[in-house]
Image (cartoon, helix red, strand yellow):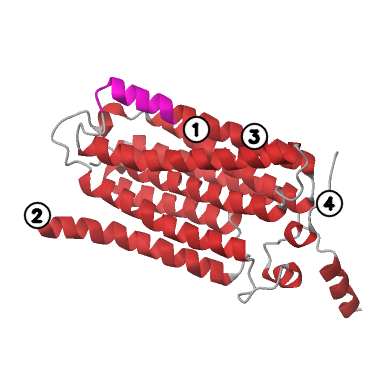
Amino acid sequence: MSTYPLPQQEATQPASPTMDAAVHPETNTGINSKKLGMWVFLASECLLFGTLIGTYIVYVGQSVTGPLPQDLFDIPLTTLFTFVLLTSSLTVVLADQAARQGNVGKLRLWLAATVLLGLSFLGFQFFEYKHFIEAGLFLKTNLFGSTFYVLTGFHGVHVSIGVIWFLSLLISSLRGNKRAVNATNVELAGLYWHFVDIVWIVVFGVVYLMSEIG
Amino acid sequence: MANQMQQQSKAAPQPVDRTKQYVAIFVMLGVITLAEVGAFYVEALESMLVPIILGLTAVKFLLVVLYYMHLKSDHRVLSLFFAVGAVMAIAMFLIVPWIVIWQYT
């Protein structure tokens, strides 16, 4: 099994505050600045998706013309692809662990799995949009169409960015770029991906499973 | 002796293998998702569907944030930042519908 030593300050970036204090570069906060920046970014993303989901909730059931959510949603298929995204969260956290351990073989395996699962999810979204458009639901058709496409479209863009990010990490790893593929960078990509996953957890519950309520 | 051990641990921190924990969390997420979908199809639960879905969604949200995003063991300042964002997002959920209802009634 091939391994390479990761840069010390970055490779040993740990989850535990005690270990963190021992190895991270000096900062005023005592926290790795990249990681702090990512969490501030994710907090701002909460507001973006909070607004989009809030808007969907306000207008659900207000559409005067069809098609409506209950006419279009395929819950078993959406459940399947929710599992795909949940599985990708597992592969990401395993990639993060492999990076901390300096196990480049496993790191590449889990990065590749994440990219494939992310692409599968995007394929599902493409298939779903195609089905909805064939059924006559466009962005301007009704309030459901506007709020649904904007919300899931923004989520899909985030998934696409995540796939590109993990693909770039995988390619850098295959090229042996030790500086680009270190534990901190994998952890940052992982935090972003898990956030995209929790947004989908909320979307699946509020938008899909509550569709009969509206 | 204790100091020596502490120094050794500082010199070469060994990442803990948490594979079993991560897989256990994944299984829990899967089971909760199936419970959500099950509740969706059970007619008797229709009147309670909203609290059931919101409750199970919150549990899944917390499992991912605490264990996969490491907030359970990470620096508390990070949890604080994220909590501020999440609380403001939840406030948005509550305020926006209230404004719309107030405007049209």
Q: Give the range drawn in magenta.
A: A125-137
The span from disc 1 to disc 3 (Cα, nearest Å) is 12 Å
Label 3 secondary element: helix
Question: Which callout, 4 or 1, points at the residue further toward the start of the chain?
Answer: 4
Q: Which of B60 and A100 is in front in this view?
A: A100
What is the CA distance from the residue labelled 1 to the residue labelled 2? 39 Å
Could you tell which of marks 3 and 4 lies nearer the N-terminus? Answer: 4
Residue A11 in the image: x percent, y percent?
A: 75, 56
Q: From what the image shows, is residue A121 above or below residue A181?
A: above
Q: Nearer the viewer, mark 2 or mark 4?
A: 4
Dot 2 lies on which element?
helix
* Residue linked to disc 1: A121
The answer to whether A140 appears left or right of B14 in the picture is left
Q: Dot 2, crowdedness within 10 Å: few (<14), some or many (≥20)?
A: few
Q: Which quadrant would residue A45 be assigned to in this image?
A: bottom left
Looking at the picture, do discs 2 and 3 lie on one chain? Answer: no
Give the Cα separation between the discs numbered 3 and 4: 23 Å
Q: Mark 2 points at which residue?
A: B104
Q: Quadrant of residue A115?
A: top right
Residue visible at 72% across and 51% down?
A182
Residue type marked 3: Ala
